[in-house]
């Protein structure tokens, strides 16, 4: 890490801990209230801490507790303003294990928190790239539906 800013260093350490422990519920602690998350392949942007956490939680928690989906950070670097993380993700889709490389996560740091995140997904396997393009188009609807269901369960308990 090349950062000399203690706030940035702490933020990066907390982010890496969230990913390592698959504790995406805590991700909101790392975000500004006005944070934006853009999933670049489809160009959709979630705005505000609650929506960003919802989008990242739906993705990050999918099968992560049963070991069927794992994120492996392959490279990362930072300065006082940005953090860039390259990673691979393994998942079970239709009973078949897929390892998807080509993820890049770029986040802007403001006042010791992330205020802007862009995720680029570019798998090296053309078949997976085509499959992923179809799956990602429905992702905004999926996150809205799951967030709505979570809110309903929380209100009824």
Image (cartoon, rainbow, N blue to C red):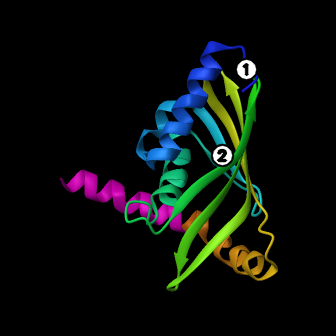
Q: SS class of the residue under badge 1?
A: loop
Q: Is residue 112 visible?
A: no
Q: Earlier in the sequence, mark 1 or mark 2?
A: 1
- Identify the residue position indicated by label 2 in the image: 37
Please tell me in which quadrant of the rendered image residue 44 appears: bottom right
Q: SS class of the residue under badge 2?
A: strand
Please tell me in which quadrant of the rendered image residue 5 appears: top right
> What residue appears at the point 60 percent right and 32 percent down from the top-left corner?
34
Question: In the visual, does 114 lie left or right of 49?
Answer: right
- Give the image location of residue 150, x and y in percent: 35, 57
Numbered disc total: 2
Q: Nearer the viewer, residue 12 or 154?
A: 12
What is the C-alpha distance between the residues marked 1 and 2? Answer: 23 Å
Magenta stretch in the rendered image: 142-157
**Does 102 appear in magenta?**
no
> What residue appears at the point 38 percent right and 60 percent down from the top-left corner?
65
- Identify the residue position indicated by label 1 in the image: 3
Q: Nearer the viewer, residue 15 or 58?
A: 15
């Amino acid at each position: 890490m090349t950062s000399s800013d203690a706030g940035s260093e702490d933020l990066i350490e907390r982010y890496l801990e969230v990913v390592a422990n698959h504790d995406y519920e805590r991700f909101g602690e790392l975000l500004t209230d006005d944070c934006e998350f853009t999933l670049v392949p489809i160009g959709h942007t979630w705005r505000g801490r609650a929506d960003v956490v919802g989008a990242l939680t739906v993705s990050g928690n999918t099968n992560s507790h049963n070991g069927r989906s794992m994120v492996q950070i392959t490279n990362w670097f930072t300065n006082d303003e940005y953090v860039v993380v390259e990673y691979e993700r393994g998942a079970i889709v239709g009973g078949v294990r897929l390892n998807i490389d080509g993820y890049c996560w770029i986040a802007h740091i403001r006042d010791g928190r992330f205020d802007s995140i862009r995720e680029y997904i570019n798998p090296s396997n053309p078949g997976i790239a085509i499959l992923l393009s179809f799956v990602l188009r429905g992702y905004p609807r999926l996150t809205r539906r799951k967030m709505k269901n979570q809110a309903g369960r929380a209100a009824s308990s």
